[in-house]
Image: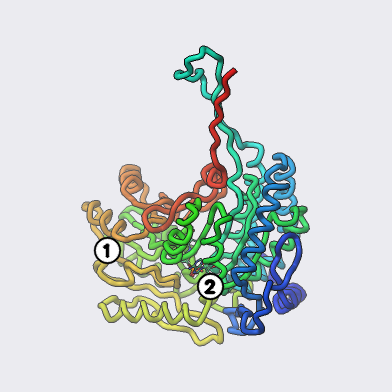
Amino acid sequence: MNAISPATVEAVEAFASAPHQFFVDGQWVDPVQDRGPDALIESLNPSTAQRLGMVPAAGTDDIDRAVAAARRCFEEDWSRRDARARSAVLLKMAELVDGQRDFLACLETMDIGTPVSLTGGQMVDSWIDALEYFAGAPRRISGETLASPASWDFTGRESSIYTLREPLGVVGAILPWNAPGSFFINKVAPALAAGCTIVIKPAEQAPLTAVYLARLFEEAGLPPGAINVVTGDGATAGRALAQHPDVDKITFTGSTAVGQSIMRDGAGSLKRMTLELGGKSAFVVMSDADIDSAVQFLVMMGVFSAGQFCMCPSRVFVDKTVIDKLNEKLAAAMGSVTIGSALDHQTQMGPLITREQRSRVTGLVDGARREGAEVLLGGHELDTGGFHYHPTLLFHPDTRLEIAREEVFGPVLLSVPFDEKDLDSVTQMANETRYGLAASVWTNNLKLAHTMVRRFQAGIVGINSHGFVDPRAPFGGVKQSGLGREFGVEGLDSFLETKTVTAFY
Ligand code: NAD
């Protein structure tokens, strides 16, 4: 993409630094109670460590107000709109996003530190793709008609049995910081397509894209209350949403620990849940693999977003006959990644989200070193003024290290040898994690490829590809990587409830 113009940067800075409010019931509103300046949350630009903006922190009363607005809109308006009307809003939204792609890419980049080369290209494109895909969904919602009459009626009447697919109701969406715009769209688009209304709580570290996208949805013609955005922290606002008795479903992307807490909090009202949680993906390279393309994917998926990607291929298992070659090429490719300000369009890897996140990565890598890992590249922070960490490649002969189990969320890959004559051992290493989000196998040997596909305990599996996302394809994890699927038919289904109708006449 072309460089972002200074005028766009200025416009983003002006938006970000302006006073912000919640978007509730189609209005921009202040918190119900004025809790003073301490109740503001600061969002930093991770490339510079400077303040980008401040947003208000919601109390439980703000969540109550937003849920009430969503409920009113659900009952009186949005769930009653026909398929064409729902579809039109999503298509209009896709058009608005397309028209503001530079602004949105720049805002996302300044809020989370993902290079503008990614946000401005494939990221905004993927938002448009998801909006357009779900714009087609309302017309496809259908139940089924059972062929034969009911067998247990003793009166001899005619009967029909059929199912209706109805919107679930009010949805609470709790977002992470690593791709806030994507998760906003991925949750809002199917919810609205299904006829649900939604209250969104973005992450405290990166709330601004969600606030701006609410503006665009307002412009796209959504009725008041269909979307509500309430900024705040997890312990208060997030929990209030998860516990709220009038919220029918939570859709959450974030860490496994918080997902578990949300499940507990939602149990009281038996909320429906879609949980997209952490990952510790395995990337398995067989001896015949195209090493160059494996290396290219590892850098793209493991380094470009500074490893802050749930499907980051953080554990690279390589057949012992090709591991030296792969490590050498991978270290060279990771070492030549252009690191810098995320706004510079030459930059391939930006900073980590916060100083704390970088310290966590430093701690994990230092721990791995103490446990005997060989550092083939990097292994240290970078002095840039932002929160950068050097792309890091570690090697260890087995998976005993803490870093082989814990999600790092940094640009750190661990390479481990295996012998492809012993597929059981690599299967065991690939699956010996509580997570099960993504995995991939790199080979042109059909038998090896499909054997590994069946053996992987993961929701997203690649053959000569890793971490594929497409709105048509169900996305989600097994084990402690989550519950349910986003995207695809299942993604839409998760916002619908089935009603069985029996008619006798
Ligand atoms: P996080 O779990 O710390 O926070 C996510 C959101 O939950 C934030 O909005 C936060 O305010 C809120 N929250 C925190 N405590 C809460 C509570 N008790 N109740 C309700 N809400 C609460 O996650 P993060 O640090 O923002 O994101 C990183 C994590 O997200 C990583 O583990 C990553 O793997 C995961 N992730 C998963 C996917 C996926 O699709 N599977 C995608 C991206 C990120």
Q: Which mark is residue 125?
A: none
Task: Specify the amino acid type for callout 2.
Answer: Met
Nearer to the camera, 244 or 206:
244
Q: Which mark is residue 349?
A: 2
Residue at 60% across / 40% down in the picture? 166
Q: Position of residue 105 (x, y in %)?
A: 66, 66
| Quadrant of the frame with the C terminus | top right
Mark 2 and mark 1 lie on one chain; the one further toward the N terminus is 2
Task: Specify the amino acid type for callout 1.
Answer: Pro
Q: Position of residue 384 (x, y in %)?
A: 54, 85
Reading the image, the residue beneath label 1 is: 417
| Quadrant of the frame with the N terminus | bottom right
Residue 437 located left or right of residue 164: left
Q: Position of residue 310 (x, y in %)?
A: 46, 62
Residue at 37% across / 73% down in the picture? 393
Nearer to the camera, 277 or 402:
277
Instruction: Residue 433: name its quadrant.
Output: bottom left
Up/down of 378 relative to 89, above or below: below
Residue at 62% across / 80% down in the picture? 39
